[in-house]
Amino acid sequence: MPPGMENFRLALCKYFPDETKAIDEYLRRIKKVCDATVTLDLHKIALSAQPIEEDFVTLEEVLDTLTTNSNIKGVLAAVCLCYGTSPKEVSFANHARVSAGLYNSVARIENGGEALIRAFREAFIKSKVEIICNATIIKCDDIKNDRVGKFILDNGDIILADDCTFTIHPQEVLKILPREHLKKAFVERVSSFETSNGFFSVFGVVEHADSKTFGPGMTSLLPTSDINALLDPKYHGRGALVVVRSVEKSGGKTYCVINAFEPDFFARMKQWADSTVGNRPIAYYEYKERKIKEIRKRICGLNADYQKNFKILGAASVLTFRDYLFSPEGNAYGIKQKIGQFNLFGKQSLLNIYVAGQSGVLPGLVGAMLSSFIIARSLLGKEEFTGFIEKRLCN
């Protein structure tokens, strides 16, 4: 699919000429949601967000009113794989808020994640920010008037702070907050959150490829139009596979790179849940080898030259992501953000505790950024926050 909303619309209408009316109405409603969502516009982000009617209807319900064509419904719902909640579970509004940007363009950051690390490091030095690694908060202490005075780390250190913002998984936050200050209904609500899917990923390079024509590009292989099934842990058919091609430079050399991701679930890994990196049973490694071969075969099906030139450099399962990224169940998108669900976000019952991150308002990078803006506005005050944003807007 080509980038740009209008180009996307034209391509869809070319593939599905009998579904033009449904396609136009779908994209009209996507635009309606985005226009009504002030937090998606930095010029309006200081305004208070209000719910709209699309917050109360699922993506599946909307698609069912537009068409009976399962293929076009599958194509329009495929973005669900980019945020980990199925069409029958997610509100149309949240689907629209994530989808619109992906329909307009798919961009990468030059120099990848390393660029973000460098930018943060430079900003932190100027702002005198201290980074503590290999330590986590295990206890909130010295609580007076519903405010935490001390934060105890697992290395024994004590941190004094006016405010604390958690960006970790909601159920990990629940473990840290003192239960005597939490209502039973709150504990039950947070405990009921379902984690989103993780991925089995394969990473490698295509040797002897022409870097001028190789990428960037992204191909989604969908073995069925039923996106609900592809995001169901109980589904055991062939999974969806997203193949991302890019050209990277390292050490003065140019590489044609492939990253491939297949949705997978912690529920399928429970037999090895107690294992750790470098200490897994043989059955796990056999499973991993089998998955690598399956995914490599599907990648090579895209181009005959890949069969002899695609060299796999690494692979990771849901357990790999869990253990390296400290994600409770190796999930990629935090919790499932289901319709009608009241997420853990913002100021908590302990008045100087805040929660942000991708499990708050929207999943992924966009959700993490939006939640940080909203929390910053609460901490700084609307006037100071608005001034900070306005000074940095390009137009």
Image: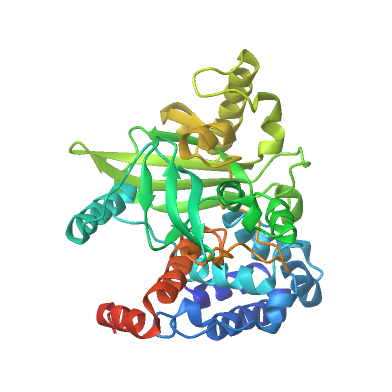
* Along the line of sight, the residue nearer the viewer: 350 or 59: 350
> Percent position (x, y) of residue 335?
62, 54
Q: Quadrant of the C terminus?
A: bottom left
Relative horizontal placement of residue 51, taking residue 208 as reference (left or right): right
Image point 63% across, 68% down: which residue?
95
* Along the line of sight, the residue nearer the viewer: 28 or 337: 337
Relative horizontal placement of residue 272, taking residue 317 as reference (left or right): right
Q: What's the colour scheme?
A: rainbow
Residue that sits furthest to the top in the current view: 282
Q: Is residue 29 in view from this perspective?
A: yes
* Along the line of sight, the residue nearer the viewer: 177 or 273: 177
Which quadrant of the structure image shows residue 254? top left
Q: Is residue 14 in view from this perspective?
A: no
> Percent position (x, y) of residue 113?
34, 49
Q: Is residue 177 above or below residue 299?
A: below
> Percent position (x, y) of residue 141?
49, 50
Q: Is residue 175 above or below residue 393?
A: above
Numbered-mark total = 0
Q: Is residue 234 above or below residue 309?
A: below
Image point 57% across, 56% down: which residue?
82
Image point 41% across, 76% down: which residue?
377
Image point 38% across, 40% down: which residue?
257
> Percent position (x, y) of residue 358?
52, 59
